Amino acid sequence: MSGHSKWATIKHKKGAADQARAKVFAKLIRQVEVAAREGGGDQDSNASLRTMYQKARDASVPLDTIQRAIKRGTGELEGVTYDQITYEGYAPGGVAMLVEVLTDNRNRSGSDVRNIFTKRGGSMAEPGAVGWQFHRKGVLLVDRTADEDALMLAALDAAAEDLVDDGEAWRVVTPPSDLHAVRSAVEDAGFTVESADLTMVAANLVPLTEAGTAKQVLGLIDALEDLDDVQAVHANFDIPDDILSSCVSDEV
């Protein structure tokens, strides 16, 4: 299945050598800090923190850096207060987008996001205009060499909802609250989990069959993700494999 999820999978696989690793670390640390601020520093009772902690560890963020972020979130160390904002908009081709932001300056973030939409051929939308098209899910990426039947059995037994072949990896979709349990079951069954995250999954996809439009959409996403305050970008596009492949060398 093509689409934003497959594009994200390809980018994750290539991300190990990403020049922007420092920026990725900074975003993950901010997510850990906010999760600790909202639900406390105990991972056993704070599922969001447990997910963000593991996400940071998967990205090789140093343990002491994560622990300091947790302490800033709980108030043990001085830290910055971040607001969570979700901007909604449209990319070229009528693609719906959600942009998740953590910021200490709402005016700066709003201006930055709006400027990117305008420069890249998109447009901002009113709150609620596109959000109804997305649903929060847990998503695991599992090494593509895993046996499909065995992986499906382990995942479904642990309450996973779906198993999808993304070409570069297996994508396991779970209810948000079951992400950690499914990950544990999959790893206990001997499979390698490459990443695990809470994300927004679109109910319906917009097909992009022209390479020019596809590149515009991917360029808009990359430009938004490059903003320091932007934590995640979700979109409901579907790009055929041949067009997606032609875009990879230009955009990744």
Image (cartoon, rainbow, N blue to C red):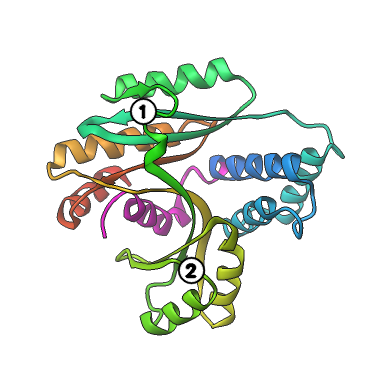
The span from disc 2 to disc 1 (Cα, nearest Å) is 30 Å
Q: Residue at x 79, y 54 (%)?
A: 42
Q: Amino acid at mark 1?
A: Gly
- In this rendering, position of residue 211 left or right of residue 236: left
- In this rendering, position of residue 112 left or right of residue 79: left
Q: How many other residues sit within 10 Å of disc 1, few (<14), some (14-19) or many (≥20)?
A: many
- Regarding mark 1 in the picture, which secondary structure is present there? strand
Q: Residue at x 54, y 17 (%)?
A: 108
- Say if mark 2 contacts mark 1, CB within 8 Å: no
Taken as a whole, is the magenta stretch helix, strand or loop? helix
On the image, the x and y values in percent for residue 146 come to: 41, 79
Magenta highlight range: 1-22
Q: Nearer the viewer, residue 215 or 74?
A: 74
Q: How many other residues sit within 10 Å of disc 2, few (<14), some (14-19) or many (≥20)?
A: many
On the image, the x and y values in percent for residue 52 come to: 63, 51
- In this rendering, position of residue 107 left or right of residue 12: right
Q: Nearer the viewer, residue 123 or 211?
A: 123
Q: Is residue 115 within the magenta segment?
A: no
On the image, the x and y values in percent for residue 99 come to: 45, 34
Where is mark 1, residue-wise? 89
